Amino acid sequence: MTYREIMKYIESEYNIINSTPCHVCGGKYLANDLEVVLMDNMPYDVCECVCTKCGNEKTFEFVAPFIEDKYMKRYKKLLS
């Protein structure tokens, strides 16, 4: 993936977060923390969000296909 494609992919993740209303009050979510984690040997962007209105917390998980194999091996080694 090119840097441009990666940025579009990440932008689409934030579009999903911004268009998802809080199920408690209908407010908007704000990204609080973002990290890459391995789930079933696949990299995921995991974004911890909080509602700006009521404080409800929600976790968004997105497959991260832009993480290259060399970084995957490093993540796996760190988690072992």
Image (tube, grey):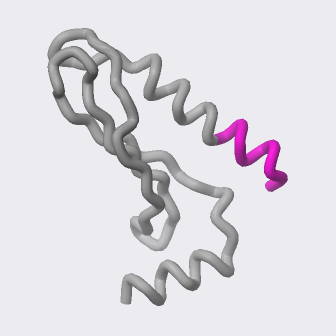
Q: Which residue is depicted at the point 26% across and 31% down?
A: 50
Vertical comparison of 10 with 14: above or below: below
Q: List x then y, in percent, for residue 77.
A: 47, 89
Residue 18 place in picture, x, y as percent: 46, 21
| Residue for point 48% across, 57% down | 44
Q: Quadrant of the N terminus?
A: bottom right
User: Which stretch did the figure color magenta?
Assistant: 1-9
67 shown above or below 59: below
Residue visible at 32% across and 43% down? 48
Residue 11 position by quadrant: top right
Residue 19 colored magenta?
no
**Percent x, y of residue 43:** 51, 63
Q: Residue furthest top?
A: 26
Q: Is residue 69 above or below residue 62?
A: below
Name the magenta segment's main secondary structure: helix
Look at 55% across and 25% down and name the residue there.
15
